[in-house]
Amino acid sequence: FGIEVTEKGILIAVDIEGYCVLANIRKNVIIGYFNFHDKISVLSSSSCGQYLAVGLKHGVQIFELPSTLIKQIEPLVLIKSYLALHSAKVTCINWSKDSRFVLTGSKDMTVRLLNLNKIEGYSPFVFSGHK
């Protein structure tokens, strides 16, 4: 479960089962509902407020957030899906300042650097450590 407020004033609230409500907190209007179909471990919105990264089990899914002006049928649109990133649950997600890269951390003591836009010859970089 989690709660996130984006730069554009969108409130994202997710319960224990993965059901999500998106609301415009400036106008007190519900934008839409979404079901992740699984329990989420962490969520984080991008610096620009246009994207949402969600930790599901051992991977991360990145969604495009809706406009704050109109109610939509499908409020979250899946852009990228990294399903088998880590060997344990994803515990933290952090965005770069320009919203082009995402860092994901896990209980398996690894951190991965993911890109949002396609870069030729790029593969997700792994930072791993020991005690």
Image (cartoon, rainbow, N blue to C red):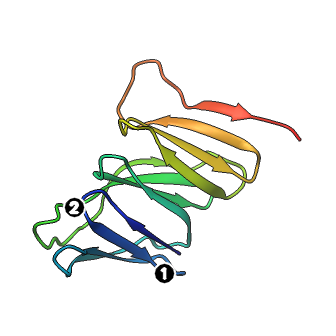
**Residue at the top extreme, as displayed:** 121
Residue 65, percent from left and from top: 27, 58
Q: Disc 2 or 1, which lies upstream in sequence?
A: 1
Q: Disc 2 to disc 1, how far (Cα)?
A: 20 Å
Query: How many numbered tags mark residues here?
Result: 2
Residue 72, percent from left and from top: 16, 70
- Rendered residue at 58%/46% (across/down): 104
Q: Is residue 78 above or below residue 28?
A: above
Q: Nearer the viewer, residue 36 or 47?
A: 47
In the image, taking residue 105 as reference, residue 2 lies left or right, namely: left
The kind of residue on which mark 2 rests is: Pro
Residue tagged 1: 15
**Residue at the right extreme, as displayed:** 131
Residue 60, percent from left and from top: 51, 52
Q: Is residue 55 above or below residue 95?
A: below
- Rendered residue at 38%/49% (across/down): 46
Using the rendered view, name the quadrant where residue 78 is placed. Answer: bottom left
**Residue at the left extreme, as displayed:** 70
In the image, taking residue 72 as reference, residue 7 lies left or right, namely: right
The kind of residue on which mark 1 rests is: Asp
Using the rendered view, name the quadrant where residue 66 is placed. Answer: bottom left
Secondary element under disc 1, as helix, strand or loop, is: loop
Q: Residues within 10 Å of mark 1 (few under 14, many from 20)?
A: some
Residue tagged 2: 66
Q: Nearer the viewer, residue 92 or 26?
A: 26
